[in-house]
Amino acid sequence: MLNSYLHAKTQTFANHPLGVLFRQTIPEQLRKLPFIDDNYKIQGSIGQGNWANIPWIAIMDKRITGTTQQGQYIVYLFSEDMRNVYLTLAQGVTLPIKEWGRKEAYQYFEQKVTEMRDQLPLESMQKDDNIHLTTSGLGRDYQVSTVAYVRYDRDSIPDDDQLLSDLENVMNNYKLYVDSLTQELVEENEPTFEYEELEPLDPLTVSPRVEQIKAYIEQRGFHYPTGLIENLYLSLKTKPFVILAGVSGTGKTKLVKLFAEALGATGSNHQFTLIPVRPDWSDPSDLLGYKDLSGAFRPGRLAEVLVDASQPENQHKPYFICLDEMNLARVEYYFSDLLSIIETQEWNNNRIVTSPLINRDSLRSEDQSIYGDLYLPDNVYLIGTVNMDETTHPFSKKVLDRANTIEFNYINLQQYPNDYRAEQQEMIVAENQFLRSEYLQLVDMYRDYSDLVHKTTEKLVKINHILEEIHAQVGFRIRDSICFYMVYNQRFQLLTEDEAFDLQLLQKILPRVQGSSLSVKRVLLQLMQGALGKSLVVNDLIEDASGLYQKWSSSQGEEDARHPQTGRKIAFMLRRLEEDGFTSYWLS
């Protein structure tokens, strides 16, 4: 490993033999050791979608932790330069830092290190912070959280007997700690730890699953634009609120139903719920519920789904809620509580929780146990379908900032059902981990994907300079959301980088542009330059841009455009501006 890893990092990550070695071969061999029994979970990683700077192999006692993100466990840590490997008794750093911040988490780590060093013999192990894994911030996290370690240098690796002796010694110390911890809980009549064992999402399995979803939908006789299913998956992974826009009859509601169904979420098992929005909805009570004259709480359909999804036995299942024609009523009136609650997401014991939607103290005692402090769990996904015409309401920036808005108005009617009678694609029973967000803040993934974050942010800085002219700049919320989308796409290798950024321009930037002024036209022309990947003489096009937008139609555009979908939409918006004197992303 020490001799080959740096060279392996120059090769393709997918299906590399080192992945098999770390994820399967080594854990299988460790399980055969006489001092390791069924109480232990063994897991190895060389990265998720891309090569990790610090590969690792962890041994966890399932009574106190089932994840390397928190708790105490044994882990082999390989230095970034591959000169050393450390056998450590360590602590998971990810979740404590997410929940408490680095300052408070470090205080906790240091307190736990002192406590365990005083409690355990730790013979033949180093008890200091001289662990040098990497030059990035993660190295400091490991130094602060490590209780004790044995260091091996690449040029002087001991024989197998010594390696096994060292591991058994560390295991004995770990057993002493776990036994004392569980004994304390028994004496205090408290339950022992039962951490949820969430296997990390293997990026190599995502693309095949998405292909299965596409095959399932096609076999039901429905066809959607190329890349739409990948886009919907990445959008839900980024944030559990997505808007599907398009002309009536393009299959928006059917897409939500089939996508959910392909993952095992149906109406019959209550994991898919269709909620038609009524034009007279004016406050959240239509969704969440209300108290009647007697003081009894009458739950809305959304509250009933949230209660079901929050049950411990259901938390691993994804739940889909389709708000059909959600802009028949003014969205801000009835959906404002949900919009605000989505922004309160935070980590708590390896789950994402939000602030309460319903205040416990406002309910009768008999309703409190069911609906009190009801929140939006991380296994619920909200998808709204919208038509933009004279019967519906427009969206405010508050709504658009919090959602990926996927529009599909370009329909190819010359698509016909295929004959799939020979072999039907069955639905996948997917765990929530497949869809659940893994990042809530930029810091959650910045260390591993800093290059992509910087590259994406630099593009957005240039776009903000353009948008400043019409006061439509994006803020940190959109910056983070686009970065999350781009990182997920890179990990799962679903789209090219240009294709992914094209969709984010289309879904997060262009909906903010509307108006009738020359400034709006200038902004659109400058954005078109970026979409084409070449310079335009903007001043010459201010008076008449017809020569530019006439090159585009629903079926063709400039073939060499860097971001063709964005370019086609901008061309549409420019044509509307010149013909009608006003333009908007939503005009049909």
Image (tube, rainbow, N blue to C red):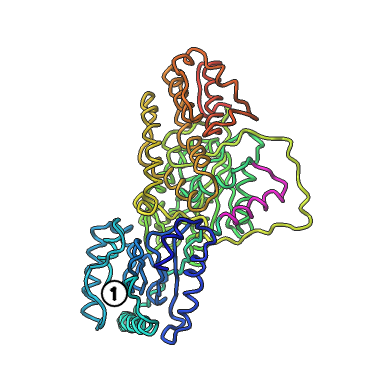
Q: Residue at x 23, y 58 (%)?
A: 103
The span shown in magenta is 207-224
Question: Picture coordinates of residue 523 (x, y %)?
Answer: 43, 24
Count every numbered label the image shows and give the total. 1
Can you name the residue that lies furthest to the top here?
543
Q: How far across and how far down the image is residue 6, in percent?
A: 41, 60
**Rendered image quadrant of residue 351:** bottom left
**Is 212 part of what is drawn in magenta?**
yes
Q: Amino acid at mark 1?
A: Tyr
Q: Vertical placement of 150 versus 390: above or below? A: below
Q: Main secondary structure of the magenta part?
A: helix
Name the secondary structure under disc 1.
strand
Q: Which quadrant of the figure contains the N terminus?
A: bottom left
Residue sitting nearer the eye, 577 or 8 = 8
Which residue is rendered at x = 49% and y = 51% of the image? 237
**Can residue 427 be seen from the camera position used here?**
yes
- Residue at the front extreme of this rendering: 155
- Image coordinates of residue 321 in percent, x first then y, are 55, 50
Q: Nearer the viewer, residue 381 or 536?
A: 536
Q: Residues within 10 Å of mark 1 (few under 14, many from 20)?
A: many
Q: Which residue is mark 1?
A: 149
Query: Quarter holding the C terminus?
Result: top right
Q: Position of residue 199 (x, y in %)?
A: 48, 66
Q: Is residue 299 visible?
A: no
* 286 in relation to 360, above or below: above
Residue 256 in the image: above or below residue 471: below
In this orientation, which residue lies closer to the viewer: 242 or 532? 532
Magenta-drawn stretch contains 127: no
Q: Quadrant of residue 139?
A: bottom left
